[in-house]
Image (spheres, rainbow, N blue to C red):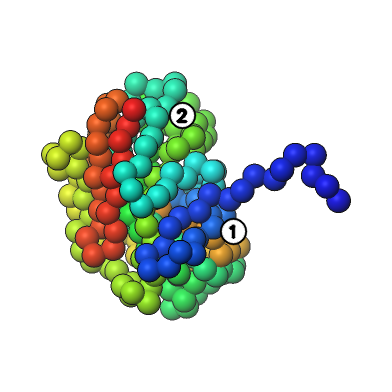
Amino acid sequence: MPYIFAPPQNASLPIAGTESRFPVRRVFCVGRNYAEHAREMGALAQADGREPPFFFMKPGDAIVSGDGELKVAYPPQTTNLHHEVEMVVALAAGGANIAPAAALQSVFGYTVGLDLTRRDLQGKAKEKGHPWDMGKGFDQSAVAGVIRPVDQIGHPDSGRIWLSINGEVRQDGDLSDMMWKVADIIANLSASVSLAAGDLIYTGTPAGVGPIERGDLLTAAVDGVAQLTVRVS
Ligand code: MN
């Protein structure tokens, strides 16, 4: 049966060491997964340092990817666009109610990404108890680098994660400070939705989030995993 118009193509990410690409299904994001960032957002972690992880989503076509200098247009309806550097998990399998001990078997690879955020819209939504979607899930809001497969780098659980603007370091953290580790994130998320091949999970950002201006050159990296650069116009 014909479609009334051509169905949209999935966004996709390059993969290190192959011409094949990773087709994106859904983009999940973890909120407040580093204690210092939770504090800077005014959301103090509990005394034990851990509340249950919570999730939000971006559309699959919000992805900006490639292996050269990426380009993002400053989005509408904001005067406070923020950067959040995050490690991104790329799934090649899924399922529901995945046990933490089995969760890493679903992972194809990892990269670095930016969870771009219209912080002013997110703040207004929080005040009113409205959804975060327009603060988080806008066009070009999910920047992602080249995927490094697990068979090249294993499962990184420590190492520097950082972001600079025009050469000045603004975020500088370590993966070991993630309150919820990748296996726990997958297990928790799979209790709410059935995960699938092509899903990406942005795993939260360390402290130091802040505004981006038009013309800025952002460099973001998870050392030993991936690095990306993006020019904002
Ligand atoms: Mn984030």
Q: For the residue labelled by badge 1, is the local secondary structure a helix, a strand or a loop? A: loop
Residue type, label 1? Val
Picture coordinates of residue 211 (x, y %)? 27, 30
Q: Is residue 173 left or right of residue 89?
A: left
Residue 193, numbered circle: 1
The residue that appears at 75% across and 39% down in the rendered structure is 5
Along the polypeptide, which appears first: circle 2 or circle 1?
A: 2
Q: Mark 2, residues whose alpha carbon is within 10 Å: few (<14), some, or many (≥20)?
A: some
- Tell me which corner region of the image, top left, top right, bottom left or bottom right, holds residue 127: top left
Picture coordinates of residue 83 (x, y %)? 30, 38
Q: Is residue 83 above or below residue 187?
A: above
The residue that appears at 29% across and 25% down in the rendered structure is 214
User: Which residue appears farthest toward the front when viewing the image?
Assistant: 19
Q: Is 6 in front, or is 134?
A: 6
Residue type, label 2? Ala
The residue that appears at 36% across and 52% down in the rendered structure is 67
Q: Is 47 in front, or is 125?
A: 125
Tell me the distance, in whole angstroms, between the alpha carbons under discs 2 and 1: 24 Å
Residue 18, numbered circle: none
Callout 1: CB less than 8 Å from ligand 1 = no
Q: Which residue is mark 2?
A: 125
